[in-house]
Image (cartoon, rainbow, N blue to C red):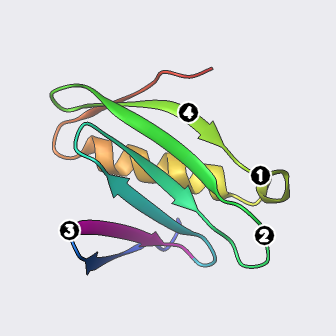
């Protein structure tokens, strides 16, 4: 089981939630009816992302994913999927995929 510890950082009008894994930090930007999860890794240019939009009350639709070539196989995408699943599951939510 992964060791996952939540942390929150507040700045200005934005709230950034960060889930920390041994070497992977997943950030979440929530814009209300849409948002994105992202992973940046030291020494690797760019970031992996998973974007989402609300599909109705309690429904999160993941609509886009991307990871730079250098991050593929690193676990970054899996960490973002675990995070969106954990966020969507509580309370009594539903997560769906809207991308291929």
Residue bearing the label numbered 4: 64
Q: Position of residue 86 (x, y in %)?
A: 35, 50
Tag 3 near tag 4, CB within 8 Å: no
Is 69 left, or right, of 11 in this rendering?
right
The disc placed on residue 29 is: none
Q: Earlier in the sequence, mark 1 or mark 3?
A: 3
| Residue 81 among those drawn in magenta | no
Q: Which mark is residue 44?
A: 2
Say which of marks 2 and 3 sits in front.
Answer: 3
Along the line of sight, the residue nearer the viewer: 23 or 44: 44
Q: Nearer the viewer, residue 18 or 85?
A: 18
Q: Residue at x 47, y 53 (%)?
A: 37
Q: Position of residue 13 (x, y in %)?
A: 20, 68
Q: Determine the CA span between mark 1 and mark 2.
A: 9 Å
Label 4 sits on a secondary structure element that is strand
Q: Which mark is residue 68?
A: 1
Q: Position of residue 50 (x, y in %)?
A: 53, 44
Magenta-colored span: 13-21
Q: CA distance from mark 2 to mark 4?
A: 21 Å
Q: CA distance from mark 1 to mark 4?
A: 14 Å
**CA neighbours of label 2 inside 10 A, class few (<14), some (14 to 19), many (20+):** few
> What numbered label is drawn on residue 13?
3
**Dot 1 or dot 2, earlier in sequence:** 2
Residue contact at pointers 1 and 3, CB within 8 angstroms:
no
The answer to whether the residue labelled 1 contacts the one labelled 2, judged by CB atoms less than 8 Å apart, is: yes
Q: Secondary structure at mark 1?
A: loop
């Amino acid at each position: 089981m992964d060791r996952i510890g939540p942390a929150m950082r507040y700045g200005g009008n934005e709230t950034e939630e960060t889930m920390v894994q041994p070497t992977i930090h997943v950030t979440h930007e929530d814009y209300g009816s849409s948002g994105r999860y992202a992973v940046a890794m030291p020494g690797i240019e760019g970031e992996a992302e998973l974007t989402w939009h609300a599909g109705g009350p309690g429904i999160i639709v993941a609509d886009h994913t991307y990871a730079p070539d250098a991050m593929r196989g690193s676990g970054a995408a899996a960490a973002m999927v675990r995070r969106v699943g954990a966020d969507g599951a509580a309370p009594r939510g539903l997560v769906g995929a809207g991308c291929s």
